[in-house]
Amino acid sequence: MTVPAVDAMPVDETHDPALRSWVASANGHSDFPIQNLPLGIFSVAEDTPRPGVAIGDAILDLAGCADANILPPPFAEICRAPTLNALMALAPADRRRLRAWLSRMLSDAQVGAGAGLASMLHDAAACTMHLPARIGDYTDFYVGIHHANNVGRQFRPDNPLLPNYKYVPIGYHGRASSIRPSGEPLVRPRGQQRVGDAAAPVFGPTERLDYELELAVWIGEGNRLGEPIAIDDAARHIAGLSLFNDWSARDLQAWEYQPLGPFLAKNFHSSVSPWVVTMEALAPFRVAQPPRPEGDPAPLPYLLDPADQARGALAITLEVSIVTAAMRAAGAAPFRLSRGPATNMYWTIAQMVAHHASNGCNLNPGDLLGTGTISAPTRDGFGSLLEISGGGRTPVQLDNGETRSFVEDGDEIVMRAVASAGDYIPIGFGECRAVVTSAPSAIREGSSASP
Ligand code: CA
């Protein structure tokens, strides 16, 4: 009997809570202790972007390791690339081998010193992060069932959850060209909106700009066109996760979304956190998919795998904060808008992948799947302002007296997430942040164009 794909990334010595790094800032680091080792693309000054590993407050230069001939094959060649696509495409066994090598190099001071690793560390604060991969395709799902209920109730009061929801991991094809790394400002989009019961729409800046708290699922090894991915094999095709803010213009969305779904309300800018937390790193944080409510249908057989149901969900807590222009000027701490667990997903990430490829659609390394907004059942865990403010009827009150129904110019939205379980050292995702502006000149020239 073959090992289910979800179990091909077992907990091993790289997750040992006792493991410490000679990179001192890694020990006790809230995001990047040695148990994490996330992959990203970074650059220093004017140098070319290259793969790196976050360790504490530093970044280990993997291209530098390749040039110094200390990386074992086949990693040297793919670590000189300006994107992680080839690294993501590695088979899980190879990805584990790379992780084991990094873990040993960064934990054993003698081995690390012998390899001259200290000279390949950069202060993360002095580096620029880029998109981790060349994203060929981006698909956004809708697996946060409380979000689907909350939004459905606003758009269709009599019929919030359509009958297909509990059978189909609902999704749509999004736009890859406008996905940007964390930190890049976003320009308030303009578009058609119908105000109230007006007979005709108007065209102008969105007045209902919103964020959506999601996880980004990075596709690893792809599949050939016409060859579906089986549910018990789907975990093998996932390289890792990042945080994802699927910026949305609710007024544009309400007017345009029928009959074909989201279009210009969603494709103007999406922010992704630059560090890819690998599925190998997340092994200790795989948990059972919560049982479906009484009376819900079981997934169809092509989406049902006992191992995925037993270990296919994720013990990740996600949160969103806001820093308004006034808060920034006053030096105030970010105001937390919500916090909730990723187990509020009605479908697992493996089910998303298996469903996506079930018709033979080919996925490629570096493709990005958004989970859809992950909301908890209660307001303190809602993953969008549309939900928190009840469509603008109940604005959220910030500590400084400001209120928000939707995102305003100068606001910065900051997303964070931590995976934690039992005695394992928690690992974080870093930040996904972006400030909203109405000035197109705020976009940095040439930043993060597809490498
Ligand atoms: Ca979305």
Image (cartoon, rainbow, N blue to C red):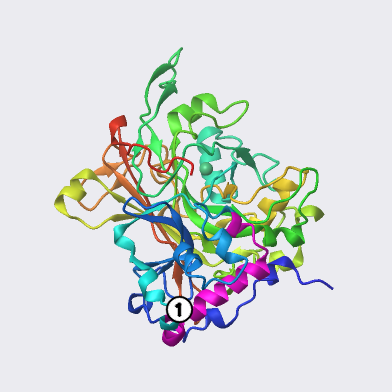
Left or right placement of residue 249 versus residue 44 in this view:
right
Q: Nearer the viewer, residue 45 or 2?
A: 45
Q: Residues within 10 Å of mark 1 (few under 14, many from 20)?
A: some
Per the image, the residue denoted by label 1 is 115
Residue lying furthest left in this view?
A: 330
Q: Residue at x 18, y 45 (%)?
A: 326
Q: Nearer the viewer, residue 319 or 270?
A: 270
Q: Residue at x 16, y 48 (%)?
A: 329
Q: How many marks?
A: 1
Residue 286 sits in quarter: bottom right
Left or right placement of residue 55 versus residue 364 in this view:
left
Residue 160 at x, y = what percent? 59, 39
Magenta segment: 86-112
- Could one spot residue 32 in this view of the protein? yes
Asked if the magenta segment contains residue 100, the reply would be yes
Residue 376 at x, y = what percent? 49, 56
Relative to 6, is 387 above or below?
A: above
Asked if the magenta segment contains residue 346, the reply would be no
The kind of secondary structure element at disc 1 is loop
Left or right placement of residue 144 versus residue 9 in this view:
left
Disc 1 within 8 angstroms of ligand 1 (CB): no
Residue 132 at x, y = what percent? 49, 53
Residue 240 sits in quarter: bottom right
Q: Nearer the viewer, residue 219 or 336?
A: 219
